[in-house]
Amino acid sequence: MARWEPGARERLQKAALELFSGKGYEITTAAEIAQAAGLTERTFFRHFADKREVLFTGQDEFTSPFLAGIEAAPQGATPLEVVSSAVIGAAGFFPVEKRAYSRLRQTVIVANPELQERELLKMASLAATLAAALRGRGVAEPAASLAAESGVTVFRVSFELWLADETGASIDDIERKVFRELGALTAVTAE
Amino acid sequence: MARWEPGARERLQKAALELFSGKGYEITTAAEIAQAAGLTERTFFRHFADKREVLFTGQDEFTSPFLAGIEAAPQGATPLEVVSSAVIGAAGFFPVEKRAYSRLRQTVIVANPELQERELLKMASLAATLAAALRGRGVAEPAASLAAESGVTVFRVSFELWLADETGASIDDIERKVFRELGALTAVTAE
DNA sequence: GTCTATAGTGCGATAGAC
DNA sequence: GTCTATCGCACTATAGAC
């Protein structure tokens, strides 16, 4: 028999989301989360650098699908087409089954500025990674940054639309629409 | 004679920037900043909700020039043209004289994730405000959000280029160039 | 695992300005 | 008298050091 139950991190994350959505993020203490997972406060901070990270750790893995999408883009592709390939390529990370969980998590984040800040930092970090990948393909600045940031913007807008959607649309369908909207925005001039 | 010296907030902000850039943000305590300004820690927190806010309070006023730029845009203008008017209209907030101060402040922010988070939240808040103003002009979603976010992206990229610039270019000139870059990005298709 | 510093809050007291 | 900026003290939670 094991000395401790496995999956401490996952238990902490599950307990945290439940407590945050149940009684509120701010008044939930790290000690409470740890206790709910059968662990001590010290262990909580051994797994997560700070209280906010409990909602974000693991989420980082979704950078790879974006990078894979960039590599999958053909040689002649426009910077924005490359980014589009990245964003749409990462759509597999958000199957319909995950939507209920994503909605709950997003509700908690939107209600707490501290968590919004952390999410924005993660998105900014993703954009910086994408921009670096574009530069690696020979795209110059500021085009690389603009394309990367635009891609992340499309992803964020699409993600919100996907969470709100009631028709069962997949996130990559929504992303394609939003990319077309973005193209229309800059293309159309006043009559 | 007054019981307290006036301008407590400004004194705190000045002392904070000096200490942050001199010995580092993290190891500078709120009590130290207060002491350097001839005040107590409790007074520091009466002026600023948290330690990070000391670098951002007052900065909020720069939302107004953006909104003024939106109102100044002609009726027939494209969403992106309206946003462009907002971003370029706010350029007056950053005269060359402010550049040395802006550079110092930015150096401190870039070196500390906590401060980056706060800056990102402020930018997200600005984007949300601009998107609301666009919807007020009849722009539908998701076009309003996309245009607003794109505008803020152009502003951020331009601001960084302005800080790095050695030729004495004004920020609105840089912004115009970056807006053209953005247009080129989405317009050009692979050959 | 314990111990400590710092961030941040709540409340009451003070003492001018009006 | 009221209003407001400040201080002082007690307190909790976070987070890092040892």
Image (cartoon, coloured by chain):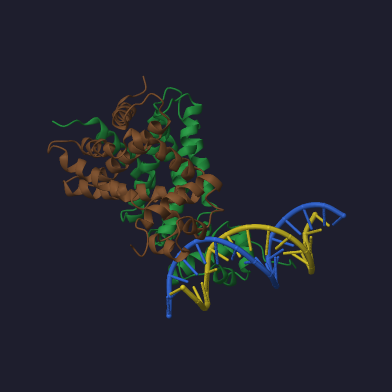
Chain colours: A brown, B green, C yellow, D blue
Query: Relative to the observer, which residue lies in front, A19 or A48?
Result: A19
Q: Quadrant of the C terminus of chain B?
A: top left
**Residue B158 percent across, percent down from the top left:** 35, 46
Using the image, determine if residue B178 lies above or below residue A182.
below
Using the image, determine if residue A168 lies above or below residue B9.
above
**Residue B31 percent across, percent down from the top left:** 57, 70
* Residue B169 in view of the camera: no
**Residue A83 percent across, percent down from the top left:** 24, 39
In which image quadrant can residue B39 be found? bottom right
Q: Is residue D3 left or right of residue B34?
A: right
Which residue is painted at 43% across and 53% down in the image? Answer: B117
Using the image, determine if residue B138 lies above or below residue A74.
above
Using the image, determine if residue B170 lies above or below residue A48.
above
Q: Residue furthest front?
A: A1
Q: Is residue B41 left or right of residue A125?
A: right
Query: Relative to the observer, which residue lies in front, B121 or A167?
Result: A167
Which residue is painted at 46% across and 64% down in the image? Answer: A40
Number of marks in picture:
0
**Residue A166 percent across, percent down from the top left:** 41, 26
Q: Quadrant of the N terminus of chain B?
A: bottom right
Query: Relative to the observer, which residue lies in front, B34 or D13?
Result: D13
Q: Is residue A80 left or right of residue B43?
A: left
Q: Residue furthest top?
A: A191
In which image quadrant can residue B140 be found? top left
* Residue B68 in view of the camera: yes
